[in-house]
Amino acid sequence: MPLDAAPAPTTAKPKSAPKSGPQKAMEKLGLRRDIDLALHLPLRYEDETRVTPIAQARDGDTVQCEGVVVDCRVELRARRQLVVRMADDGAELVLRFLNFYPSHQKSLAQGQRVRVRGEIRHGFFGREMVHPAFKAVTEDTPLASALTPVYPASAGLPQAYLRKAVGAALARAPLAEVLPADCVPGRLPSLREALQVLHHPPPQAALAALEDHSHPAWQRLKFEELLAQQISQLQAQRERAQLQAPALRGQRGGLHEQLLLALPFALTGAQQRVCEEIAQDLARPQPMHRLLQGDVGSGKTVVAALAATVAIDAGWQCALMAPTEILAEQHFRKLVGWLEPLGIQVAWLTGSVKGKARQKMLDAAASGAAQLVIGTHAVIEDKVQFARLGLAIIDEQHRFGVAQRLALRKKLASQALEPHLLMMSATPIPRTLAMTYFADLDVSTINELPPGRTPIVTKVFADSKRLEVIARIGDEVAQGRQVYWVCPLIEESESLDLANATETHAELSAALQALHPGVMVGLLHSRMPPTEKAAVMSLFSQGQMQVLVSTTVIEVGVDVPNASLMVIEHAERFGLSQLHQLRGRVGRGAVASVCVLLYTGPLSLTGKSRLKAMAETHDGFEIARRDLEIRGPGEFMGARQSGAELLRFADLQEDAPLLKAARQQAPRLLDQHPEAARQHVMRWLGSKVEFLKA
């Protein structure tokens, strides 16, 4: 019995019986079914299978000792504490409890044999343990037969209760093998054997292999999880291939060719290649499901415009949805400039468009008069109807949730057709991530920047250099350049000691007015009314405003070629991909540009890694690879899984061989063992399978 053993939870209760505190705590952790508990794996293990003599215990070791209590008393020092001395063959150990109950004194009474477990420290009175786990024993009390698991838990959920619940569930859970034996790589154990080892490892088990997840039992679970994910992705891809979509082909001499001739620049080779890939998809009667990825400033917007002309040329409508009003407006301005001269009517639909103007846009979309509709989440509202939606484009796709993307695709559902879907991202997807979460997508990559782009120099400074940075801003303004200053918060927070955008605006205004009277410093944040945001951005875009103090609302979509300096305050608080996005707001003209990362110490290891990566590389793909190492897949996934990670156990970096095996076996299982594939996916993913359809 483990040291902190408690009565087993009752497994059968009347439906009307109120749930106990531990049961409610388990439900909050998502532990409702036997399979949930069986897959709730230990964080670490405690070795209660052996006893270390007190004389052999070394400082810093976590050990289990056994002996007889020779003294137990409450001492009044800086605070009341229970001090217990126990002895084993003449060697003594002090047990110190700063928080204790009367029951402690009873269990640790003089003459009582006890078994304790904790870290050995060198105290003032010799070796001691502070707040060890303990229990009263006799000389015949057996040792544990397996390592004791320590589970992820929460308040109100004791480890002993959780261990009993997991043990009972493990015996009941449906863990029969559903996979053919020849599809499991190597000599990995069965699923039930693997879980038995992970929950109750024998004393001789390699503890290091269990805790670093390299043990064969862990490998089996990781393979099972990756296989379920790969099967579900392949299934979603095959189901999508059965759907019907309008076949969209441009006309010779039509809008596509007219736009190419009208553009004031030539497409790069990479842009031409991805345009051809998209055109081939649009011409098929199955819905396109393509991700267009490219580094900041690589020219994705013009590719989207050319894709739209193909759809419009074929007599269908196009919708473009962006996550913020600023980004949507940036797209609107560019696309109107390119497409209206060709006779294309563009509608603008965001939350700020109200009244008659909004109704006019809705009517234009519903009648088909608006051939292209650009907007934010407002585009997917129920009131928005399209006459013939053939192509849906989603920019910064990771910023949208599953339900939002599905809602846009269903705008054509009444016609028994699906629109083609083009998703765009300036956050390149690392290869290992593309092989897992995005395996059902076709990916087009713009891997070169337009000519004339100047490299951005990135400099990292402590906040103590703030005045020098402000002086540099004055130099840029004197040369007719423009500057961004980005703050991470809008208002003061009690929990985060961060600079306030409003205060920074006042500080910079005063400092720069002293250096250059008449300089205009603007302020932009997400709580401003849309009309004020538009006015500020207009002044900055037209060059009348020299410095823009902003929160991260300018992360994407803002294009001001004259801006040559970006200052990011409290850079250690931003994610790596977000820092790279912000940096991409400068370097858009012919003048050499600088990005200054101001940080406030001391830096965490993660903060140091991010700033180091920013200083060392400008390659968005390398940034993405390092971000995956630092943060995991969350930043790239956004809400694709609606906040629920599909991979709980596998690691995309370390488990590449298992991923390769899963990718090889998935089509074989679907083709030759469809029922086994279905059961396997439902065991691991359940309802989460629906998320993959977005």
Image (spheres, rainbow, N blue to C red):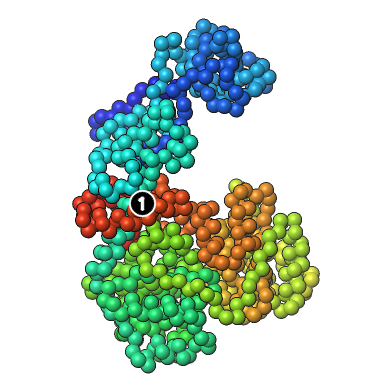
* Local SS, label 1: helix
- Asked whether the viewer can see residue 528, the reply is no
Q: Quadrant of residue 158?
A: top left
Q: Please state which amino acid type lies under the numbered disc 1.
A: Leu
Spot occupied by residue 76 in the image (x, y as percentages of width and height): 65, 16
Mark 1, residues whose alpha carbon is within 10 Å: few (<14), some, or many (≥20)?
many
Q: Nearer the viewer, residue 675 or 379?
A: 675
Residue extending farthest to the right is: 514
Q: Is residue 4 left or right of residue 579?
A: left
Q: Is residue 269 above or below residue 341?
A: above
Numbered disc total: 1
Q: Where does the image place residue 323, in percent across and percent down from the top left?
A: 46, 67
Q: Residue at x 39, y 57 (%)?
A: 436
Vertical comparison of 258 with 502: above or below: below
Q: Quadrant of residue 362?
A: bottom left
The quarter in which the N terminus is drawn is top left
**Residue 511's spot in the image, x, y percent?**
76, 66
Residue sitting nearer the eye, 575 or 615: 615
**Residue visible at 37% across and 39% down?**
217
Q: Please state if 407 lies on the left or on the right of 377 as rendered.
A: left
Front residue of 391 and 180? 180
Q: Is residue 13 above or below residue 213?
A: above
- Please provide percent x and percent y for residue 537: 58, 74
User: Eyeballing the image, is 322 above or below 388?
Assistant: above
Q: Residue at x 41, y 11 (%)?
A: 140
The residue under label 1 is 226
Extreme-front residue of the structure: 186
User: Going by the picture, which residue comes out furthest to the top?
Assistant: 111
Residue 650 in sight from this viewpoint: yes
Is 61 situated left or right of 516 in this image?
A: left
